[in-house]
Image: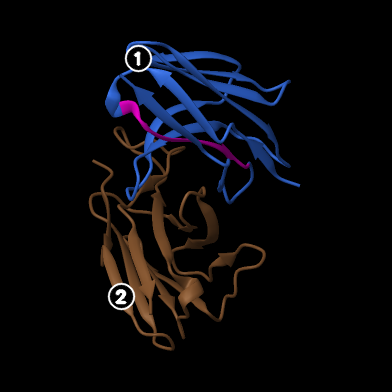
Chain colours: A blue, B brown
Amino acid sequence: GQNIDQPTEMTATEGAIVQINCTYQTSGFNGLFWYQQHAGEAPTFLSYNVLDGLEEKGRFSSFLSRSKGYSYLLLKELQMKDSASYLCAVREGGATNKLIFGTGTLLAVQP
Amino acid sequence: GAVVSQHPSWVICKSGTSVKIECRSLDFQATTMFWYRQFPKQSLMLMATSNEGSKATYEQGVEKDKFLINHASLTLSTLTVTSAHPEDSSFYICSAKSLGTASIKAYEQYFGPGTRLTVT
């Protein structure tokens, strides 16, 4: 079966660093995505990992270990506007390339 | 580039009526479009995958006769919720995927802004 787990909620302080973990067990794997979603809005793309290792993009970094079925999203220099849900999604292989979304992590950034 | 629109952005309808939601890729051709549903405080659940000119592939548990999907062109897909009931009230989001260009990544899905459906 398909299983993608994330912590439900996290709280962090403005200016700090937070790491959001994602573990997955899927029938196929062709890449892992992280999205940010503010309430009532569509998800926005943050990062994409298909090979093991760290991808850095400004204040956001994402790590992937395919052998462990594990990824994390690292947010540095947290700002109040980073308060949002963060969604981990695995892309299945094959012709469909559909995304299976994790449960999502609601991050609250406090002053 | 890679803009996806949805119409309407919100809709209220009476129980038993049908509602059509449009998803358009504005500046690229979408070979595949996906329809998701999201209930409050939950993650996105894939409902169906549609490829231009062919029948949609529905996920397990999604009634294809209730959620009619048409992908008639490379820039337009529609989702019709037939005989809507209050339990169909949700946030419906589409995404579109292309074969890729210099500026549009083939591996990425581009999401529309979503449609809030409320059935009374």
Q: Quadrant of residue B117?
A: bottom left
Q: Quadrant of the N terminus of chain B?
A: top left
* Residue B86 falls left or right of residue B101: right
Q: Which SS type dominates the magenta stretch?
A: strand
Residue A59 is marked as 1
Residue placed most toward the observer, B77 or A59:
A59
* Residue located beneath label 2 in the image: B12
Q: Residues within 10 Å of mark 1 (few under 14, many from 20)?
A: few
Q: Residue B6: percent from the left, percent from the top? A: 28, 60
Where on the picture, by quarter, is residue A93? top right
Stretch in magenta = A82-92
Residue drawn at x 48%, y 57% as measured from the top left: B39
Above/below status of B79 relative to B106: below
Front position in the image: B77 or B19: B19
Q: Tag 1, which secondary structure? A: loop
- Element assignment for label 2: strand
Q: Amino acid at mark 1?
A: Arg
